[in-house]
Amino acid sequence: MKEESVDSDLKRELGFFPALSTVMGLVIGGGVFFKISSVTAATGSASLTILVWLLAGFITINAGLTIAELATALPVAGGIYKYIEYIYGKVPAFLLAWAQSVIYYPAAIAALSIVFATQVINLTNIPDATRIPIAIAVAVFLFLSNLLGAKAGGRIQSVAFVAKLIPIVLIIAVGLFTPSNNPVSFFPVTAGSHPNFWTSLGTGYVATMFAFDGWMNVGNMAGEMKHPEKDLSRSIIIGLLLITLVYVSISFVFVKELPFHIIPGNENAASEAAIKIFGNIGGKIVTIGILISVFGSINGYTMTGTRVSYALGKDDDIVFANFFAKLTKNTRVPMNAGIVQTVIAIIMIFLGTFDYLTDMLVFVMWIFSIMMFIGVFILRRKEPDLKRPYKVSSYPIPPIIAIIGGGYIVFSTIALQPVLAFLGIFITIVGLPLYYIHAFNKNKNK
């Protein structure tokens, strides 16, 4: 690897426990509370629901370990964007950043804003017609809040992180030991009344993946770790194992506390389970904690998403580069990038549902994830002498497992949701002419 591409200014001061908490903080989000409705709708039984969470955790651990090798070999600021650029070149890297800017971050903001509004309606019993106005209001409010500077956004994030853990811990710690009239059997694993077990397994697995969103960023801290060669892999394995345990436990509580038939398609399943466990008042308090957690997740996507299109503008890689590179005068945050991101999110709020939007962003991002997994093989062959502080153990098994898991997500989405897949691919490819038009104009003006 060329020396100049390494960010030599990064301070290597992170140990194992900060890395472990970073992994868990990046991955655990609002999906843990709200994907249970679509997962159970896909699986048809409590036993298969638990199995697909275990399967998703297994795939994600192998994916995280594969990315860890890239992260330690290419410890550069920019994470997955820089990995794609280094392995495949500028154009695929631009398409990734473009897809993040117009699909990934806006869709995540829109999906979680819809969930936030749904929970507010459930908590306060206000008319359902207020769902879209509330969703838009929270997206706009957090965009405006982030204009106050990174410190303001960071404070929201810190509060939300604590709030996120409280309902999770309470639901699991109390729910596991609360008597229930809905016994859960792990064996035999069946698809309930669904006609095809393997279709239910695959669809359920795909539905879980938004809850694991964030795993691909776990390698970004490699350049700041004291001993990445031993601590990065440990933090990823233990962190993602703990996350999988959390997801399996909380899903078990949901199917244990609520009759299974009322969970599929029920966006309020988490709050209903909380009320069942803690009573009406206690359940509502836990629901408020869930709301704050979702609020923080929206804030996280709002904060980080604007930096992607800002970086494209700053590097003069996108049309209207100066517009996207513009920062606010005092707080130095990318305002114009935030405006565009919020407008796209609002459009998505009108057009999509939580599951539709999250399925689209998972589909698109896993295409680029597979490229990174394949990139490990490419670099092993092309640059065998590249310094790798961490080499994925049992190679090539983890990257192969990650490619198979990611490939299933991509091809099953194309087969089962062709319109969604086409839309995601089309929006991504639209970035190509924009890139070449801008590149042509840059060269002409030199």
Image (cartoon, rainbow, N blue to C red):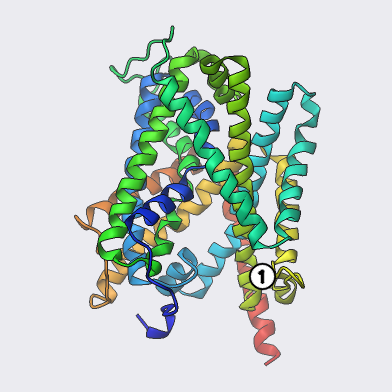
Q: Which amino acid type is shown beneath numbered disc 1? A: Leu
Task: Say which quarter of the image contains residue 445.
Answer: bottom right
149 is higher (above) or lower (below) than 57: below
Q: Position of residue 361 (x, y in %)?
A: 56, 48
In terms of secondary structure, where does tag 1 sit? helix
Which residue, given by chain and number where applicable, does mark 1 sit on?
434
For the point 31% across and 19% down, the residue is 186
Farthest-out residue, left = 394
165 is higher (above) or lower (below) than 13: above
Q: In this view, does 207 lie to the left or right of 223?
A: right
Task: Say which quarter of the image contains residue 87.
Answer: bottom left
Q: In this view, does 136 lie to the left or right of 303?
A: right
Closer to the camera, 236 or 175?
175
Q: Position of residue 121 (x, y in %)?
A: 72, 26
Q: Is residue 412 left or right of residue 95?
A: left
Q: Where is residue 374 in the image (x, y as percent from the top left)?
A: 34, 61
Q: Which quarter of the image is occupied by the C terminus?
A: bottom right
For the point 46% across and 64% down, the residue is 80
Q: Which quarter of the image is occupied by the N terminus?
A: bottom left
Residue 446 in sight: yes
Estimate how packed mark 1 is, as few (under 14), some (14 to 19) or many (20 or more) residues with alpha carbons within 10 Å.
some
For the point 62% across and 65% down, the residue is 307
Closer to the camera, 213 or 156?
156
Farthest-out residue, top = 181
134 is higher (above) or lower (below) than 6: above
343 is higher (above) or lower (below) than 189: below
